[in-house]
Image (cartoon, rainbow, N blue to C red):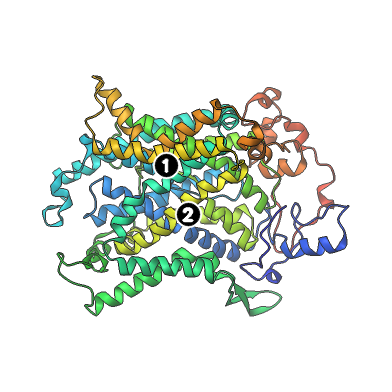
Amino acid sequence: MTVEKENNGLDNYAFALEGRFCDLPDSGEDLDSSIDEDNNKLAYCVTDVPPWYLCILLGTQHCLTAFGGIIAIPLILSQGLCLQHDGLTQSHLISTIFFVSGICTLLQVTFGIRLPILQGGTFTLLAPSMAMLSMPEWTCPAWTQNASLVNTSSVEFIEVWQSRMRALQGSIIVGSLFQVFVGFSGLIGLFVRFIGPLTIAPTISLIGLSLFDSAGSSAGNHWGISSMTTALIILFSQYLRHISVPFPTYNKHKKLHTSRIYLFQILPVLLGITLSWLICYILTTCNVLPADPDHYGYLARTDLKGNVIEQAPWLTFPYPGQWGIPTVSLAGVVGILAGVISSMIESVGDYHACARLSGAPPPPKHAINRGIGIEGLGCLLAGAWGTGNGTTSYSENVGALGITKVGSRVVIVASGVLMIVMGVLGKVGAIFTTIPSPVMGGMFMVMFGVICAAGVSNLQYTDMNSSRNIFIFGFSMFSGLVIPNWILKNPKAIATGVVELDQMLQVLLTTSMFVGGFFGFILDNTVPGTKQERGILAWNKAHEDDCSNTLESGEVYSLPFGITAYFSTFSWLRYIPFCPPGLQNSLEPKQPLENLQTPKGGTFIV
């Protein structure tokens, strides 16, 4: 197993133990290599149960790691929903997305892929959603852009934003049904066969590039504050990431003592936002920032939405259909489908990375099918609840596993419960809406840049000395920028005579990730080139190992509560794509369970 060669974010000695999958060197390894592995072994593997206080602590950390991405989505979406000046509704959207993310996380860890992987909002659906809301019929009325003209409690204003939200909800619900079908039917393998790095690279990169306007608009409200936020996040995440900070900890053996945590590496975004937020509060209190709405820098004040915290209820219970009955449009559904396909392919890669970092065997096909199906179900729930977005696996939290060396899925269960609690506490969502827009803009500068670079990083699998690959990637990227930009400037250029077809083409051709991904897919599968040149061999290498019939795989990926044991009595279930192919064999232990070592401070879940 490959793990980052860095010290733990927490003190290893406080909970050192012998794991089952992650610390046993092969018999052929020499003593020195075993000692090296000892320094990198996981403290807790995927099936281990850490002490309850450690679950809460690390669960909180995972929530904070996903914090930036989760709150960014409703705040960006509020621009297309005409909610820039309605902080109370923004707080409801933030509470809803936290609540649904918590439910989807619990579903994924319990019945889906069963790996310690967090679920949250996805930027792959944000791009087509914003493209849909930019259509002429959904363009925000001019009066909604003026804070003095907006009466957030008026029936007219409520109908303006709720009608747009309902259209988004319907499109997401229908699009998620496709993902549910692809997952539970096992068709995800067919998609992976034809989609390679030259399709994924422009698709993911253009998600970040297409959001440059949102980042620029927010950061431009006060470039000084946004630059400070960006600089702080860069400082914490890049320059100070190897510096450990003393932190008081307690355990039975050492009692109260000090251990060192790589705090800057674990929470750079949260620290950067919090510090900038605090500085904006001080500048607002001292009246350094202008109090006149017409002056530059006014939007950096922290008291613009101060009444939102007072108005927000202590407890709020998001429920399906809270914004009304969803509506469906063909254009919206087709646009969302483009995002759903991208999200599925990205999640498959996250599953394999998560398995490596959590001490689990490579995920078998039936577990991947189940994971994608549950993600589709999560998108369905997000659409029903009205987050304006879907759910996907969070790569940031997969990376956090390599830092903390704690791969237990019970920790992610604690994260899911915590997010549900945050979604129910209305004041929490209200607090997040008071973050000044320049601070969010500074975070967007970093976050969207990383998304763009993450897409380009997929080219490492291909031969970029090949003129074929250079042409395909370059053309796909440039087309993904040029065509949507031209369509947005000439919205009446598409006139086929069929309104539904015009709307569908409008959404697709203004979604950069679809345009770039489409050209990348067509050219990569039609222009002659070897599989090695295209990167297909290296891309699929991680997906070839199917350990579905091993004891370890059965313990990690089997369904809980005795469901797998019950299903094993029906031999025909092995032919269902999301059930293990050899249920009986995978449940037969190779040695008595009493001969297996139980870790200190935790137990195994079988």
> Label 1 near label 2: C-beta < 8 Å?
no
Q: In this picture, is 582 found above or below 353?
A: above
Taking the view exactly as shown, the residue that stands out farthest to the top is 497
In percent of width and height, residue 41 lies at: 73, 60
Q: Residue at x 48, y 70 (%)?
A: 235
Q: Quadrant of residue 351?
A: top right
Say what secondary structure mark 1 lies in: loop
Q: Residues within 10 Å of mark 1 (few under 14, many from 20)?
A: many
- In the image, residue 297 lies at what x, y percent? 23, 67
Task: Decide which of tag 2 and tag 1 comes sooner along the chain.
Answer: 1
* Displayed quadrant of residue 383: top left
Tally of numbered discs? 2
Closer to the observer: label 2 or label 1? 2
Residue at 41 percent of width and 50 percent of height: 99
* Residue bearing mark 1: 390
Position of 34 relative to 232 (above/below): above
Residue 302, how many percent across, how many down?
A: 27, 68
Q: Amino acid at mark 1?
A: Gly
Q: Residue at x 66, y 24 (%)?
A: 575
Q: Give the residue at mark 2.
A: 450
Task: Please state if 41 lies on the left or on the right of 464 as rendered.
Answer: right
Q: Residue 585 vs residue 464: left or right?
A: right
Using the image, determine if residue 491 lies above or below residue 79: above
Answer yes or no: is residue 106 visible. Answer: yes
Q: Nearer the viewer, residue 322 or 26?
A: 26
Vertical side of 26 occupied by 370: above or below: above
Residue at x 82%, y 61% (from the top left corner): 34
Specify the amino acid type for callout 2: Val
Q: Is residue 157 left or right of residue 172?
A: left
